Image (cartoon, rainbow, N blue to C red):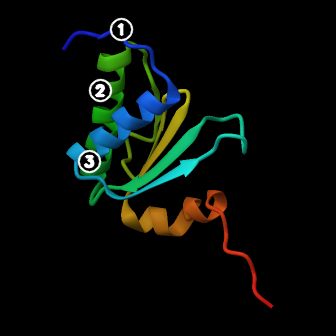
Amino acid sequence: MAVTGEKATSEKLLATILSSLEDDKAEDVVQVDLRGKTEIGDYMIICSGRSSRQVAAISEKVAQRVKEKYGHMVRIEGRDTGDWVLIDTGDVIVHVFRPEVREFYQLEKMWMPQPAATN
């Protein structure tokens, strides 16, 4: 597939990645808005695959689709083991976990707003 040359805004990247995750049956997809909270990116996506093989496949497809649509490479870490793969597209950071590994690290709790304590 040819590169479309479309400019990759963070919102367009987010939409492309979310579509890719849906196509590849990623589970428990959580989107975290990082704008104004950190300089690492505008959005973070956390999701799960049922097995190491699916985690690796989901990650490969995200990277491939971003490259095809916007023409830029992404950085991928952890693909070889398939337990936790980090995909850095620049403005959108994607974490793909096996469920047990995701439960252990609980990244959502670090980044999602916590409910206010009641007295």
Q: Which amino acid type corresponds to the residue marked 2 in the rendered image? A: Arg
- Residue furthest right in the image: 119
Label 2: few (<14), some (14–19) or many (≥20) C-alpha neighbours in 10 Å: some
Q: Are marks 1 and 3 in contact (CB under 8 Å)?
A: no
| Residue that carries the numbered disc 1 in the rendered image | 5
Where residue 90 appears, x then y in whole percent?
55, 27
CA–CA distance between discs 2 and 1? 13 Å
How crowded pointer 1 is (Cα within 10 Å; few <14, some 14-19, many 20+) is rated as few
Say whether disc 2 or disc 1 marks the residue closer to the N-terminus.
1
In front: 116, or 90?
A: 116
Residue 65 numbered tag: 2
Left/right of residue 85 with respect to residue 22 in the rendered view: right
In the figure, 17 relative to 69: above or below? Answer: below
In the rendered view, does 71 fall on the left or right side of 118?
A: left
Amino acid at dot 1: Gly
Q: Is 112 displayed left or right of 69 in the figure?
A: right
Q: Nearer the viewer, mark 2 or mark 1?
A: 1
> Closer to the camera, 77 or 17?
17
Q: Is residue 114 left or right of residue 117?
A: left
The residue lying at 35 percent from left, 29 percent from top is 63
Q: In the rendered image, which residue does mark 3 sit on? A: 22
Q: What SS does tag 1 mark?
A: loop
Name the foreground residue: 8 vs 111: 8
Asked which quadrant contains residue 101, the reply is: bottom left
Q: Tell me the amino acid under the disc marked 3.
A: Glu
Quadrant showing the N terminus: top left
* Image height of 11 relative to 71, above or below: below
* Callout 3 crowding tier (Cα within 10 Å): few <14, some 14–19, many ≥20: few
The percent coordinates of residue 38 (x first, y second) are 72, 41
Q: Secondary structure at mark 2?
A: helix
What is the distance, in whole Å, between disc 1 and disc 3 at their CAs?
23 Å
Please report the residue visible at 53 percent of the width from the left and 45 percent of the height from the top. Answer: 44
